[in-house]
């Protein structure tokens, strides 16, 4: 009698400071074990391993750390789970992005070659590496002139964090690295190459971070030439023209991949995902009409739809970018938690600080407690949440924050609450923008530290957005999302939706809109929208003019 | 040979807490001596002398304190000046207003009668007594319906500090006091009655505080009847219909007046002035085109003009109210120093407090030092100064403050400066309102503690208003103004302008506009004005709607 071994899947979440692998049961998503590994070099933002100083705004990583992470997590997780490597049906990974490096075509990172180990541009440029800001200004101008349609897909502006600016910076800083590089590749795709011996380019990275669109591929030669004549042939020489969909798999582990992971040769490897997006299947967000609202210093709103059409005012969208058959749309709020922190850091009086000290709570918490006793509309305040410009839907970094309704009786907690409310109104504008362009949002999953912590804020969001807000536990969701991806790659499930329906975690809490609050917020939102359009859509361009006066 | 004695004049300034008499040389305004007397009862805002508790918002005084002040200042000042009482050519007084009391027609205050000494309403209601707020709401409604033209003279609203609300309150609280009172009288006019035996009513008090206008006298019977049927006959029974101009004198000291002051019987007494306005002649502000800008918690803008016509948007105007032949206009900013204090008290972080402590300076001063290093427009901020509503020129207490241009890099000193700038913009709107209605302002004298202290603010005012700002020393100017008035009353000069030209003090400092700043502020003011009209004149009534939601 043949014994059929129970099968498991492994997902690895490559974050900014560490990687975490989980072994999951594909039947129910249950986590059997996990193993975490901190990158020995961490984020290099001051110097290279040899002491070479780095300019400001730089953030590098060492690619060997990722290899070490593979070696130190997967075998350990397998041992802890008390399963055999042969029981692992598939492996999936997710990675930060755009986190890119120059390599030889066999996968060798240039920074591991003796001639380049002192050259900062030969290392991994981490997603938050901002050295390319000068190049980005020029690149945006060129796109504006020569390829405005593509720019429109990304809400009118490329970020200095993205692939093309980072490559242009490398070319400017170190033509030798550019010359020598046979490939510029996302770290996630690089791991696929290392593990399988085969190069693929995940649509998630290409679509969201490398200006690739299904309609017209990568930017044309003349655009690249305008950026720098030496970059003319970048595509097809240093970046393959072909992009791989999420319905493909990255490949099968080869000898090297097997050696690094202890998994058998031939184990399927899923197409890598973007770390934030890996949370989507982990939370069961695979259907049209579901939105994940990731609330941090800024906010990201990701939603899937059966529809695939440009949505004016959002950050970008990629067909089949996360879930095959679905188009994933991203919109952003440039300033959420950052605004609360700014206020707490600069505008809270000594007496509140002392009160927080005495009660042994944070200043945020003392403000929250005071603000929680306020009713909607009670303070008479209304704010515009543009303290760091507006990303969606106006895409205008020259816009600024506004607070109105101030009197000599206005208290700090009232302003604090008004700022929080303004971010909810900002989110509602985005929601309505989606909905007015036929992208329906039925369910909202709020994720991020604030979402779990700030009950007042989440109730405000439910009341303003007039939808239940489900609180998602995403801090550990990336690896599970990758494991779900692996379950599809290994053929256990036929697609992501099916896999997620079995393996995803439930939300941990729901906030339902309160009718009496929602009614007042409806009025306040109408006021917000009027001011939003007045200041943001040309009624009065005072904010731009003040910005220019600065 | 007859020896002609040199003549002097005496002015007494009756302030909120004390009275101060000066002996001045009419030839040059030089102060020979002065004497101050603090009122023994001070401001009674908690209890009467017998312990009777007072409600909140009350502020009473004891009329005997004023008599004691006469007895304790004038003789002493004469002795210190080493002159003889016969050398005093005339006496002038100024008084806070509306500071009123109920009396018998012979001048006996009701509170000195045994039957009323426990009745708070029998005492002097000081200018800042706010017990009449309920009555004021009703009175404003009645005026709005039945006498909107009169209300327009006072910018659309009577204050609870004024004569009619205070009398209505007395009637409500204590009909016995109302019945017994043969007169309701300003304390300044009461002193004229005591000193001369003759009742007069100064146009300054009547015009600015008792709703009297040259065109139509006091409010009509039907108005008073609507306020309370028992008040129908107030005018002509308890308040004489006749009002006395500044070209008249109050009278001549009688036996009693002589006894109190040691001055000879027959010494002329000038018509009493309002304390703030007495500063005008003392500073030489007697001509058309000169404005005094009194900067305190709120601000008052007083200007004289040969023109006598309604100015839409200002607080009020009285023909011949201060200077015979001139019309005096008052406009107001509801919130100046109060806004700075609000910000300092609530929105300055601990680290700034510590820095101020270490440097042993005030928090205002630390903010000023930091804000002084900023250039106009540098912060990108623009504010509307309506933190306590808007008095002139919109007269709308439902308006509120606004700050725009905020970013997560905005620092407290930037907001502090933006609030200061907003009050300068608010003043400019008032100035332009005067000028657009043919009341020219050529010179501005800034008065009040802030004006002397805050160099940054005064430079901003000069730059925004595009006029030199002369800093006036007004803290001691009231008594000199009254002495100047006495010099006219005694016939030494034929009018106030002539007297002031000889006797007034010079300003202590001038701030001249800086061209490069003025150019930037011109742009910022244009933005302010657009938002002023948008939010204040119906473009977007969001502030009112938010106020209603509260």
Image (cartoon, coloured by chain):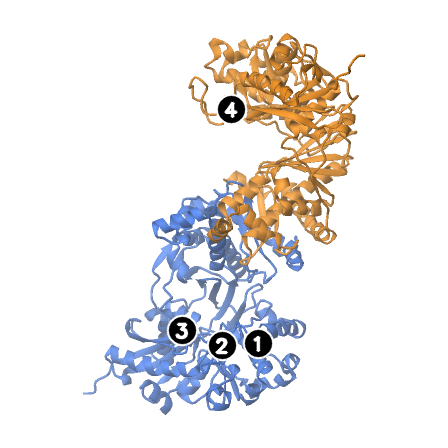
Chain colours: A orange, B blue
Residue corresponding to mark 1: B165
Position of A396 relative to B449 (above/below): above
Depth check, mark 1 against mark 3: the one in front is 3
For the residue pair A398 and B133, the one nearer the viewer reads as B133
Per the rendering, the mark at residue A42 is 4
Question: Residues under labels 1 and 3: Cα distance?
Answer: 23 Å
Residue corresponding to mark 2: B205
Q: Quadrant of residue B472?
A: bottom left
Depth check, mark 3 against mark 4: the one in front is 4
- Secondary structure of the residue carrying tag 2 is helix
Residue at image coords 48%, 18%: A120
Question: Residues under labels 3 and 4: Cα distance?
Answer: 69 Å
Percent of width and height locating residue A329? 71, 30
- Secondary structure of the residue carrying tag 1 is helix
Residue corresponding to mark 3: B17
Q: Where's the N terminus of chain B, which quadrant?
A: bottom left
Depth check, mark 1 against mark 2: the one in front is 1
Few, some or many C-alpha atoms within 10 Å of disc 1 (few <14, some 14-19, many ≥20)? many
**Numbered disc 3: what chain?**
B
| First in residue order: circle 1 vs circle 3 | 3
Percent of width and height locating residue A222? 63, 16
Few, some or many C-alpha atoms within 10 Å of disc 2 (few <14, some 14-19, many ≥20)? many
Position of A303 relative to A2 (above/below): below
Question: Residues under labels 2 and 3: Cα distance?
Answer: 20 Å
Percent of width and height locating residue A545? 55, 41
Depth check, mark 4 against mark 1: the one in front is 4
For the residue pair A277 and B389, the one nearer the viewer reads as A277
- Secondary structure of the residue carrying tag 4 is loop
Percent of width and height locating residue A221? 64, 14
């Amino acid at each position: 009698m043949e014994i059929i071994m129970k099968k498991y899947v492994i997902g690895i979440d490559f974050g900014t400071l560490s990687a975490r692998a989980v072994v999951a049961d594909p039947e129910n998503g249950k986590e059997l074990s996990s193993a975490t590994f901190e990158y020995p070099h961490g984020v290099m933002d001051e110097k290279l391993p040899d002491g070479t100083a780095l300019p400001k705004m730089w953030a590098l990583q060492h690619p060997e750390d990722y290899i070490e992470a593979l070696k130190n997590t997967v075998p350990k997780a397998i041992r802890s789970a008390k399963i055999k490597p042969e029981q692992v049906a598939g492996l999936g990974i997710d990675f930060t992005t755009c986190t890119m490096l120059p390599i030889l075509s066999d996968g060798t990172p240039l920074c591991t070659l003796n001639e380049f180990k002192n050259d900062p541009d030969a290392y991994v440029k981490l997603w938050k590496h901002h050295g390319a800001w000068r190049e980005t200004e020029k690149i945006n101008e060129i796109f504006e002139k020569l390829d405005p349609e593509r720019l429109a897909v990304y809400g009118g502006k490329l970020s200095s964090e993205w692939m093309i600016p980072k490559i242009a910076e490398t070319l400017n800083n170190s033509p030798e690295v550019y010359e020598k590089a046979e490939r510029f590749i996302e770290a996630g795709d690089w791991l696929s190459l290392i593990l399988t011996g085969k190069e693929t380019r995940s649509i998630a990275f290409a679509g969201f971070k490398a200006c690739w669109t299904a309609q017209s591929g990568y930017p044309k030669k003349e655009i690249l030439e305008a950026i720098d004549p030496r970059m003319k042939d970048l595509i097809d020489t240093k970046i393959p023209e072909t992009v791989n969909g999420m319905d493909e798999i990255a490949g099968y582990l080869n000898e090297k991949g097997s050696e690094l992971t202890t998994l058998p040769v031939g184990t399927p490897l899923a197409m890598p995902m973007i770390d934030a997006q890996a949370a989507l299947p982990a939370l069961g967000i695979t259907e049209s009409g579901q939105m994940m609202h990731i609330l941090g210093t800024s906010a990201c709103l990701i939603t899937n739809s059966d529809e695939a059409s440009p949505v004016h005012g959002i950050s970008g969208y990629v067909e089949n970018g996360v879930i095959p058959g679905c188009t994933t749309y991203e919109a952003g709020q440039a300033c959420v938690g950052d605004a609360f922190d700014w206020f707490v850091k600069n505008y809270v009086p000594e007496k509140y600080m002392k009160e927080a000290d005495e009660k042994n709570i944070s200043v945020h918490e003392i403000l929250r407690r005071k603000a929680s006793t306020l009713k909607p509309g009670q303070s008479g305040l209304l704010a515009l949440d543009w303290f760091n410009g507006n990303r969606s839907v106006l895409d205008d970094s020259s816009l600024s924050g506004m607070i109105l309704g101030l009197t000599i009786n206005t208290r700090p907690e009232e302003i604090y609450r008004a700022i929080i409310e303004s971010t909810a109104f900002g989110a509602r504008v985005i929601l309505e923008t989606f909905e007015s362009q036929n992208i329906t949002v039925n369910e909202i999953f709020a994720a991020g530290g604030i979402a779990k912590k700030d009950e007042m804020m989440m109730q405000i969001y439910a009341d303003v957005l007039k939808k239940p807000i489900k609180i998602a536990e995403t801090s550990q969701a990336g690896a599970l999302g990758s494991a779900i991806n692996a379950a599809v790659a290994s053929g256990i499930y036929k697609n992501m939706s099916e896999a997620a329906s079995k393996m995803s975690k439930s939300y941990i809490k729901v906030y339902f809109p309160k009718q009496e609050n929602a009614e007042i917020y409806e009025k306040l939102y109408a006021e917000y929208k009027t001011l939003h359009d007045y200041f943001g859509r040309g009624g009065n361009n005072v904010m731009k003019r003040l910005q220019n006066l600065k």
